[in-house]
Amino acid sequence: MLEMAGLGEVAERAYRLLVRAAEAGAGELAGELGVGRDAVDQALATMVDMGLVREVGDASGRRYTPVAPDVSLRPWLARQQEAIDRARLLVDQLAEEHRANLQRRDADRMIEVVVGRAAIRERMRHVQDNARDEVVSFCRAGHVAMPSEENTEEMDALGRGVRYRVIYERELLEEPGMVPNVAYGIERGELARSAPYLPVRMAIADRGVAVLPLVQHVSGMTEPTAAVVRGGTLLEALIALFEGQWERATPIRIAGEGLVPASVPSCPLDADELYLLSLLVAGVADKSIASQLGLSQRTVQRRINHLMRLAGAQTRMQLAWHAAREHWL
């Protein structure tokens, strides 16, 4: 084991024997070790030079005793550790340089361009099928490759414990059939919010791969293209974009999602009223709310007026402010 300190086999065995015996002559060591006297003399000379043993007695009866191991070997171990630390730092620097060079050389592996609705749809399904922790996404109005109602992979992923955080553009919530579709997802565990406008469509799985269209609007004759981004600062920027939008987006509460959290026991609204309020705060127009709920526009306005009375608000803006202050949503 001490060969790393520069000791050969004979020297290490001799040193161990001296530690146990406390003192011995060269002849005694040769006899105990079963090796020639010349080999022992050479080993002792090496250990004396290294400061592991010292000579005692006179020339007629020269004997050797070990220097305390913690005194003789610990400084050497410290020097070795320093050398290892410097080598480790160098390895880390070289590894980082290698990764940077590899990314520059293999940029095409980080960004893949997918062409065609069928190919994009298949890639989105593959990304969700392989998600293990979380999928986050921006859902804009007007689908490119996969309508929301066709995204059965989300339900499968939710079923196996994958978390979904989705931000819906306001215009999308006003499309026929979207509110029930969103409600269906929320009932199964999706966390949904709404924003007046989203800058891009995209989905990010496990913070490791993102899929986003390269062209926002395509005609019926033009095949859409999408980028699949893996790693790198571009993916980090997309993640940061989502998190920033998520913080500013309005939570969507759907009837049947559940009661108000226990931390807000004073909320006077039932699930249906929270549902209506969430759509209102999200900016969905009265006409669209009425259409989605199967109510008349007058009934929707009457229920909104009821919410305003509960909040003591004179305007809808005051209602939204009161709802935010009281944590109704």
Image (tube, grey):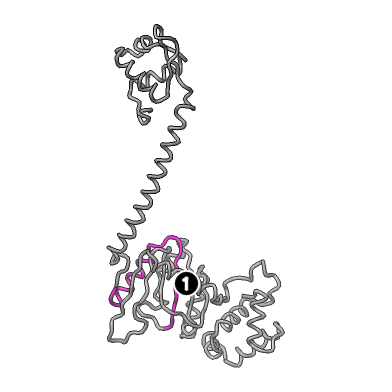
Range of magenta residues: 114-141
- At horizontal 55% and vertical 85% (from top left) the residue drawn is 283
Residue 5 lies left or right of residue 184; in this view the side is left
**Res 189 visible:** yes
Q: Amino acid at mark 1?
A: Phe
Whole-percent x, y for residue 318 in the image: 66, 85
Is 182 located above or below residue 217 in the figure? above
Q: Which residue is mark 1?
A: 242
Question: In which quadrant will I find the C terminus?
Answer: bottom right
Residue at the limit of the structure toward the bottom, as seen here: 298
> Residue 82 is drawn in which quadrant?
top left
Which one is in front, 68 or 116? 68
State whether residue 140 is above or below residue 288: above
- Residue sitting at 39 percent across and 6 percent down? 60
The residue under the point 27% across, 63% down is: 105
Asked where in the image residue 79 lies, by quadrant, the reply is: top left
The residue closer to the viewer here, 215 or 314, is 215
Label 1: few (<14), some (14–19) or many (≥20) C-alpha neighbours in 10 Å: many
148 is within the stretch colored magenta: no
Q: Position of residue 42 (x, y in %)?
A: 32, 18
Residue situated furthest top in the rendering: 60
Asked where in the image residue 112 lies, by quadrant, the reply is: bottom left
